[in-house]
Amino acid sequence: MPSNRPDGSASASGVEGPRKYLIGGNWKCNGDWDASIDRVTMFNGCGDIPANVEVVLCVSDIYIPMLLQSIRTDIAVGGQNCGVNKSCGACTGETGSHQLKAIGCTWVIVGHSERREGFGMAGETVGLCAEKCKVALDNGLSVMFAIGEKKEERENGTTMDVCASQLAPLAKILDAKDWEKVAIAYEPVWAIGTGLTATPEMAQETHKNIRDWVSTNVSPEIAEAVRIQYGGSMKGANAKDLLAQPDIDGGLIGGASLKDDFFNVINGVPR
């Protein structure tokens, strides 16, 4: 399988490869209005984004209009979740993917572990996550589809079994055109917000296994093209080593996306 890191000299515009890096920021439910405005001002004053990097900020629904009006044009805006119905209607508390698209969002996160586990609820099933992804794609959004295992699943050697179980319903309902707008965000649950991070070698092994699974269960062409992000406490200090791995095509960043360290992550891509 061709590497995502072609040989060649580094340049200010970034190394070009078959898969453009995707750096997503997930603000989760952090900050108040003033803090979010200050954060936008800070990001607008940061340096250039390399040409080989796509950047998206996924924020709480109430902050989306503010970001769409004020964030720099080379940073896209997305939602952190969306409803499963194509047009929500009588779905109190939901935000439809068609509504996100209508106001200017281009991306949405689906399947984050905090949604899969729920908040005192049963959580979102693997089938529901796949359905939500398909509806979002049909409504014109791109999707960062999050998967990942818990600590005990990593320790008992079932990491890929878990990831495969989360991807299998998706593989059944997406067509080749759908996959063009999907990125897989591998987020080991044990490394989200804990400060723990998989070593670059551990992360690369799982990313390659995911790509191989897609090759076998979807198609080799889609496996080569799909971007697989790493989302386990990536920050400026470790981004360069993680992003140097051949099957790590970006990150889904939590805590670091609330600070100027987010641009250290962006600048961690091979140059």
Image (spheres, rainbow, N blue to C red):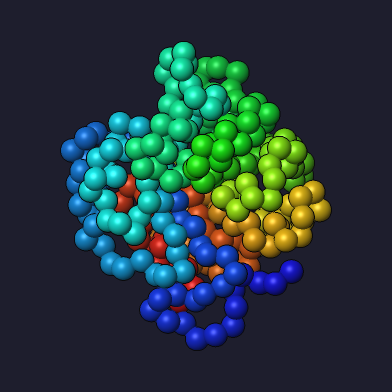
Residue for point 60% across, 78% down: 6
Q: Residue lying furthest right in this view?
A: 216
**Residue 13: quarter of image:** bottom left
- Residue 135 position within the rendered picture, expressed as x and y whole percent measured from the top left: 57, 33
User: In the rendered view, does 49 fall on the left or right side of 118?
Assistant: left
- Residue 163 position within the rendered picture, expressed as x and y whole percent measured from the top left: 70, 42
Q: Is residue 200 visible?
A: no
Residue for point 68% across, 29% down: 127
The C terminus lies in quadrant: bottom left
Position of 7 relative to 210 (above/below): below
**Residue 174: quarter of image:** top right
Residue for point 56% across, 61% down: 249
Q: Nearer the viewer, residue 112 or 20?
A: 20
Q: How many marks?
A: 0
Q: Nearer the viewer, residue 21 or 231?
A: 21
Position of 151 relative to 265 (above/below): above
- Residue 91 position within the rendered picture, expressed as x and y whole percent measured from the top left: 47, 16
Q: Is residue 42 visible?
A: yes
The N terminus lies in quadrant: bottom right
User: In the rendered view, does 41 fall on the left or right side of 231?
Assistant: left
User: In the rendered view, does 217 fall on the left or right side of 131?
Assistant: right
Residue for point 76% across, 50% down: 218
- Residue 149 position within the rendered picture, expressed as x and y whole percent measured from the top left: 65, 40
